[in-house]
Amino acid sequence: MFNKIFFFRIRKKKIELLEIRRQSIHLFFGMILAMLLFFKIIDGFFLIGLFFLTLTFCSLIKYAKIPIFFQFLQIFERKKDLQSFPGKGLLFFVLGTTLSAIFFSRFIATASILILAFGDSVSHVFGRHFGRIKTPFHKKKYLEGLIFGVLLSTLAASFFMPFYQSFLASLISMILEFPTITFRKFTIDDNILIPLSASLTFYLLEIFEKF
């Protein structure tokens, strides 16, 4: 009995450390892409190339353990994803970023990427460790994480877009993350959903202001 409790705690600790590593790289990678895009060091065409390069690596790694890339995934990837769809989170993160950069202005895309980077990572870690009230939309996510994620992502996005727009875009995109949205048996990943819903919210608010 003692051994089972001990190994359960060790396993739980490893999972928590993995999630912290995953969300940390999520935040860091998003900040880097947002700044490179804003200062025009990269653009939508570069991100398209990055997406297809990532897709190639993710496809190959199921059959061949590509040095460095595979070791990187072992550090930051969940075990089940590493076996079924290696690099899924990274691939969809790049895709969501790419779509925002292609279809929306530089300011909107930058703010939306920061909402993805801050909102998704912070809400997950904060809710996991300090959450007490579960949301009605998702049994594994907490209201405290949602609130903290919205606040931080609003602050980050407000450097590039008006504050009230940043708040509404953060709130709407973070709420839309909770339910599982499926289209023709394909579950829409939150790394795609968050930046696109945030970008669309910014875009519609800008149109509304013109009337």
Image: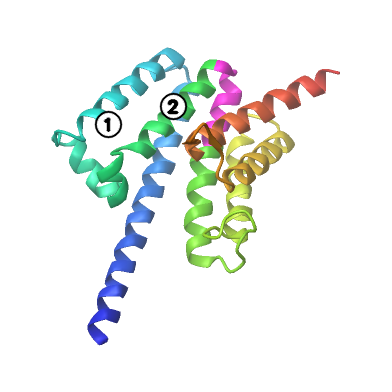
Q: Residue at x 56, y 19 (%)?
A: 106
Residue beneath the point at 32% across and 55% down: 18
**Of 51 and 82, which appears nearest the observer?**
82
Residue 188 point in image, percent of width and height: 50, 36
- Residue holding disc 2: 95
The extreme top residue here reads: 45
Residue 58 — which label?
1
The image shows residue 49, relative to residue 141, as above or below, that is above
Is 81 situated left or right of 119 in this image? Answer: left
Mark 2 falls on what kind of element?
Answer: helix
Q: Residue furthest right?
A: 211
| Type of amino acid under label 2 | Leu
Q: Position of residue 204 (x, y in %)?
A: 73, 24
Relative placement, left or right, of 132 versus 68 is right
Which region of the structure is painted magenta?
103-114
Query: Residue 147, image x and y in percent?
Result: 63, 54
Is 201 above or below relative to 180? above
Identify the residue at image location x=71%, y=34%. Answer: 165
Q: Is residue 106 magenta?
A: yes
Marks 1/2: CA–CA distance: 13 Å
Residue 85: quarter of image: top left
- 10 Å crowding of disc 2: few (<14), some (14-19), many (20+): many
What is the number of the mark on residue 70?
none
- Most prominent secondary structure in the magenta stretch? helix
Tell which circle, 1 or 2, labels the residue nearer the N-terminal end. 1
Q: Residue at x 23, y 47 (%)?
A: 74
